[in-house]
Image (cartoon, helix red, strand yellow):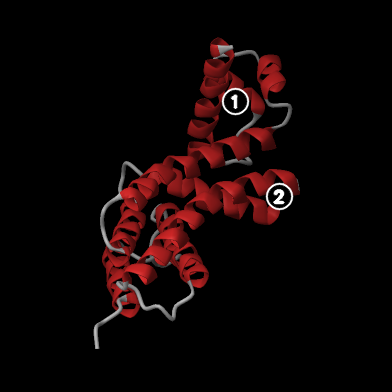
């Protein structure tokens, strides 16, 4: 059983390397089998179609981000301080060591805009994102309860704002830094920090 798990993990890792370098559409199952050093028939036994591998790679990229948000949730800080850490973490995803995962996630969203993937498979990706969304939503609730975040603000709306605004900006930055700004302008780290500070100022519950 352990050997099968390791073999499966090796295939996912090989697929991730190739998807990152060549893209989802240009990478074949034969390419992945060669990279993983297994027969293509073996690869198909584990993953009967490429979409299954794509979903596993994307979920893996999201799951790599989740532990950092869990650490923030467990920290002994106020809600607004935790939100500061959440936003700083998102900005940190554009660093060299984290860029690969963020770039993959943006490339995946572009891929599914043109190549249909089964709804059930997309729901697996949505569930992975939802874990992070739930953590951020919980932090907002804590902030409203401890008085550090304005009590009138909806935690659902705020968590979606962070996921959509910061999560999307970071993914786009990671992918589009491969292109010159004259083609597609993308937000830089300094601009994201400025937006972060503005958002924190808006969220903070100032005493009367």
Please give the count of numbered marks on the rendered protein.
Answer: 2
The answer to whether any part of residue 26 appears in the image is no
The answer to whether any part of residue 84 appears in the image is yes
Residue 155 in picture, x, y percent from top left:
47, 69
Locate the C terminus by quadrant: bottom left
Residue 97 in picture, x, y percent from top left:
32, 41
Residue 107 in picture, x, y percent from top left:
54, 50
**Residue nearer the viewer, 158 or 28:** 158
Q: In this view, does 48 lie above or below 192?
A: above
Q: Label 1: few (<14), some or many (≥20) within 10 Å? A: some
Instruction: Report the residue at 43% width, 81% height from top.
Output: 152
Which residue was labeled with disc 2?
Answer: 115
* Relative horizontal placement of residue 81, taking residue 30 as reference (left or right): left
Q: Residue furthest front?
A: 145
Instruction: Report the residue at 44% width, 59% height from top.
Output: 138
**Residue nearer the viewer, 104 or 195:** 195
Instruction: Report the residue at 31% width, 52% height from top.
Output: 92
* Relative horizontal placement of residue 85, taking residue 41 as reference (left or right): left
Q: What element carries label 2?
A: loop
Q: What element carries label 1?
A: helix
Disc ID at residue 63: none
Front tag of 1 and 2: 2
Residue 204 in picture, x, y percent from top left:
30, 76
Instruction: Report the residue at 68% width, 26% height from top.
Output: 47
Q: Mark 1 or mark 2: name the one nearer the start of the chain.
A: 1
Q: Label 2: few (<14), some or many (≥20) within 10 Å? A: few
* Relative horizontal placement of residue 187, taking residue 25 as reference (left or right): left
Disc ID at residue 31: 1
Locate the N terminus by quadrant: top right
Do the CB atoms of the residues marked 1 and 2 lie less than 8 Å apart? no
**Residue nearer the viewer, 58 or 130:** 130
CA separation, marks 1 and 2? 20 Å
């Amino acid at each position: 059983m352990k050997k099968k798990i390791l073999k499966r993990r090796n295939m996912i890792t090989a697929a991730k390397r190739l998807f990152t370098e060549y893209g989802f559409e240009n990478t074949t199952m034969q390419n992945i089998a060669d990279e993983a050093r297994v027969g293509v028939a073996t690869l198909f036994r584990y993953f009967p179609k490429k979409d299954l591998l794509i979903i596993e790679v994307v979920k893996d990229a999201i799951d790599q981000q989740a532990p950092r948000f869990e650490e923030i949730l467990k920290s002994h800080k106020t809600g607004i301080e935790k939100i500061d850490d959440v936003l700083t973490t998102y900005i940190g995803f554009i660093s060299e060591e984290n860029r690969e995962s963020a770039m993959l996630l943006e490339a995946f969203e572009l891929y599914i805009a043109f190549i249909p993937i089964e709804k059930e498979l997309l729901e697996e990706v949505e569930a992975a994102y939802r874990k992070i969304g739930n953590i951020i939503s919980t932090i907002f609730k804590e902030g409203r309860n401890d008085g550090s975040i304005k009590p009138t603000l909806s935690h659902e709306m705020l968590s979606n704002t962070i996921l959509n605004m910061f999560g999307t900006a970071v993914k786009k930055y990671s992918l589009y830094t491969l292109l010159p700004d004259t083609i597609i302008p993308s937000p830089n780290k300094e601009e994201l920090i400025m937006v972060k500070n503005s958002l924190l100022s808006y969220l903070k519950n100032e005493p009367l």
